[in-house]
Image: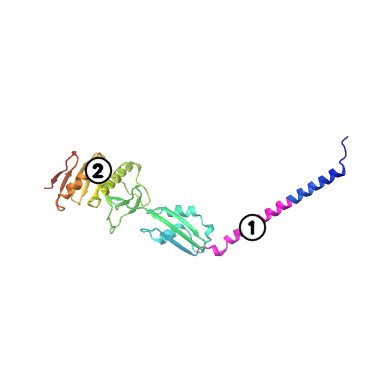
Amino acid sequence: MKDKPNNEEKIIDLQSRRKSREKKKKHSKRRTLIILFFLAVIAVLMSPYFNVKWFDIKGMGVVAPTQIKSASGIALGQNMFRVNIKKCKDSIRKIPYIDDAKIYRHPKGGIIISVTERTPFGYIKNATGDLIIDKEGRVLEVAGKNYDYNGIVEIAGIKAGNLKAGTYLGENFSENLKLAVEIRSKLEENKIEDRVSSINVKNKNSITLVVDNDKTVLLGNVYRIEYKLAMLESAIASIAPSEKGTIDLRTEGQALFTPSE
């Protein structure tokens, strides 16, 4: 037979149970306080004080602030903590000219939207309107009659089809575009990019340029392109701007100019 617990053991057991109950009560009280605290915080954050009262849109150039605001889907009077920032940014990035967007909540009821725009690089002639593209081949817009082509170059030799703004050139043209970007970069290094109006990259071994709108440059391939463009710079400096013709750079060490008849 088991020995009956003595009085001392009973007292210890009762004390242990009491401590356990007190501990549970403390934990329960703590959980309740934590829950009430978070409910209070949520109530404050959902209060009208944190409704959207103003917008501050930064970084835009081509795209109108109203278009960015509309694309975000955020409305005045909306609680700023109910705004899905990721969804709003993704929506703004769908604007063809927008490369990236960042959205911040201001504690005084404001939404700050900072955007980075894409830069037009060139255009591709198209029957329905020239396609204005950036260096990644994204179509930024289809040029209208009054489009200002200043600072961008024609990318000839690519037939892109009737692409819409916001879409990209197909993979079939990625190498051609990279080639045009490389050539344009080298032209900028030689500070003659403003005189080149067209880069034809249909054939990587028979690249041609148009200088001053009336001189065709036979570049060949991009082998020793820095040297070829240095020669081109010297050649066009010695030719009258009004003189039409062809500059042949395909033979190493030579820049042969043939006037038009």
Q: Nearer the viewer, mark 2 or mark 1?
A: 2
User: Picture quarter containing residue 250?
Assistant: top left
Type of the residue with mark 2 = Glu
Secondary structure beneath dot 1 equals helix
Type of the residue with mark 1 = Phe
Q: How crowded is mark 2: few (under 14 residues within 10 Å), some or many (20 or more)?
A: some
Which residue lies at the image location 38% right of the left edge and 60% below the top edge? Answer: 64
Q: Name the residue under label 2.
A: 226
Which residue lies at the image location 80% right of the left edge and 48% below the top edge? Answer: 15
Instruction: Residue lying at the far front in this picture: please name it.
Output: 8
Q: Are marks 2 and 1 in contact (CB under 8 Å)?
A: no
Which label number is shown at residue 37? 1
The N terminus: image quadrant: top right
Residue 229 position, x and y percent, is 22, 45
Of 243 and 75, the residue lying toward us: 243
Secondary structure beneath dot 2 equals helix
Quick check: 113 left or right of 212? right
Residue 254 position, x and y percent, is 16, 41
Which residue lies at the image location 20% right of the left edge and 47% below the top edge? Answer: 233
**Is 204 inside the magenta-drawn segment?**
no
**First to last magenta residue range:** 24-52
Residue 117 position, x and y percent, is 38, 54
Q: How crowded is mark 1: few (under 14 residues within 10 Å), some or many (20 or more)?
A: few
The colouring scheme, among rainbow, by chain, secondary structure or one colour, is rainbow
Which label number is shown at residue 171? none
